[in-house]
Amino acid sequence: MDLPVIRERAGSVLALALKRAGTLPDGITVDGFIAAATNVGDFDDYKVFPEQAHQIVKQVAAAGEEGAARAFLRAAIAQSVINAVTGEHIKQLPPLVFAYHTRQLARISEDHELDSEWLNLGHDLFHKEFGIATFRLYAAGAQLVDRRCGVPRSYMFKDGVAKSVPHLATMMKLGGFRPYFQIHTHSFMLDLFNEPGWEACYQGCVELYGLYPEVLGMFGASWFYDPAVVQISPRLSYLQSTPLNNGAHAMYVQTGGDAINNSLSTSPSRRKLYDEGNYMPKSYLLVWGKEEQRAWAARTLPPTLPLA
Ligand SMILES: CC(C)(COP(=O)(O)OP(=O)(O)OC[C@H]1O[C@@H](n2cnc3c(N)ncnc32)[C@H](O)[C@@H]1OP(=O)(O)O)[C@@H](O)C(=O)NCCC(=O)NCCS
């Protein structure tokens, strides 16, 4: 979809959403919310929304009818998409990220649902959709890339003192704990969750190092980085084998927690192993240094650009 078409569609959604939001309280505007919500520090990840943004939404909710705040947040996403496709930043995006990001902006511009329960400042889906629309997150293949992140130092010690020594040495060799790109799965982008989609993510990170040369590498944390997953769900082994065979490092984070629901919710076979006591989901962090990731990209065929 061309940028002018995305703009036009987002404009229709904006008009619809503003109508539903009703008369806004004095001094409250969608542009004001966007400015407040994107006024973040160098290491505020995509989930951080300043207090002023929360206050604006509270005022809209208090003054409007049922659903006014959700419609206001939909309007904020739509206006951000318009800003994205008409602004300067999109022109600076490297080709692969431009193609994948535009594809997500096109998808968002077609979403005119005003009552989605995730249209809520506390919801991860809102954080991700708003993050894409405002370039707080970049879409790169199967993943979203957050540039304002660091590897938590506490993770070095999760697997005991003995393992902390090589983990710390790894981080020192990579140049320190921040800044890194952190990658995230988005449930509205699962059509890209496959091996080519992940390779496009890594290639997208390599492109983004050009825009953000200070970034030291990429990291993610998930149950699918658990070495046990290679045996029990070999279909997913590419998620760890591509990075780990090309210079990435894995570190244990924790047993259970969110990993249980994330790992078991879609897979009857993992659920069965868990119920039988033969599998307990664990989270691992995977960190891939910039130079190693670049070397992998140089050895790998570039992905085909997606159609927006
Ligand atoms: C991460 C996720 C997207 C991976 O999905 P996936 O590539 O379809 O892989 P899964 O192993 O989860 O597949 C689940 C089921 O889909 C089916 N399936 C997946 N890929 C298939 C394929 N290529 N052929 C046939 N069936 C397939 C199978 O029935 C499989 O169940 P099984 O494991 O019992 O065989 C998915 O597990 C998910 O949405 N999890 C919840 C959210 C989450 O974990 N997010 C990441 C947080 S870090």
Image (cartoon, rainbow, N blue to C red):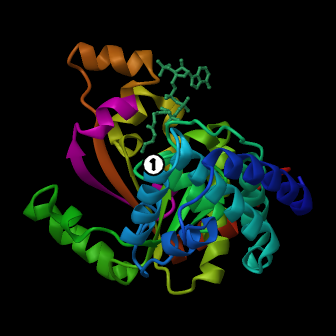
Q: Quadrant of residue 168?
A: bottom left
Residue 197 appearing in the image = yes
**Tag count:** 1
Using residue 187 as the reference point, say whether residue 149 is left or right of it. left
Q: Quadrant of residue 283?
A: top left
Q: Quadrant of residue 35?
A: bottom right
> What's under tag 1, amino acid-wise?
Asp
Using residue 5 as the reference point, say whether residue 16 is left or right of it. left
The span shown in magenta is 243-263
| Residue at the spot of label 1 | 124
Using residue 186 as the reference point, say whether residue 150 is left or right of it. left
Query: At 55% across and 46% down in the image, what residue appears?
Result: 68
Expressed as whole percent of the image width and height from the top left, the position of residue 235 reads: 53, 31
Expressed as whole percent of the image width and height from the top left, the position of residue 134 reads: 62, 67
- 68 vs 91: above or below: above
**Tag 1: Cα neighbours inside 10 Å, few (<14), some, or many (≥20)?**
some
Query: At 71% across and 52% down in the image, what residue appears?
Result: 104
Query: At 68% across and 52% down in the image, what residue appears?
Result: 18
Depth order, front residue of 271/101: 101
Depth order, front residue of 170/267: 267
Asked if the magenta segment contains residue 253, the reply would be yes
Q: Is mark 1 within 8 Å of ligand 1?
A: no
Q: Residue furthest left?
A: 161
- 89 vs 243: above or below: below
Expressed as whole percent of the image width and height from the top left, the position of residue 64 reads: 52, 48
Expressed as whole percent of the image width and height from the top left, the position of residue 121 reads: 44, 53
- 234 vs 56: above or below: above
Callout 1: helix, strand or loop? helix
Using residue 3 as the reference point, say whether residue 68 is left or right of it. left
Asked if the magenta segment contains residue 31, the reply would be no
Residue 305 appearing in the image = no
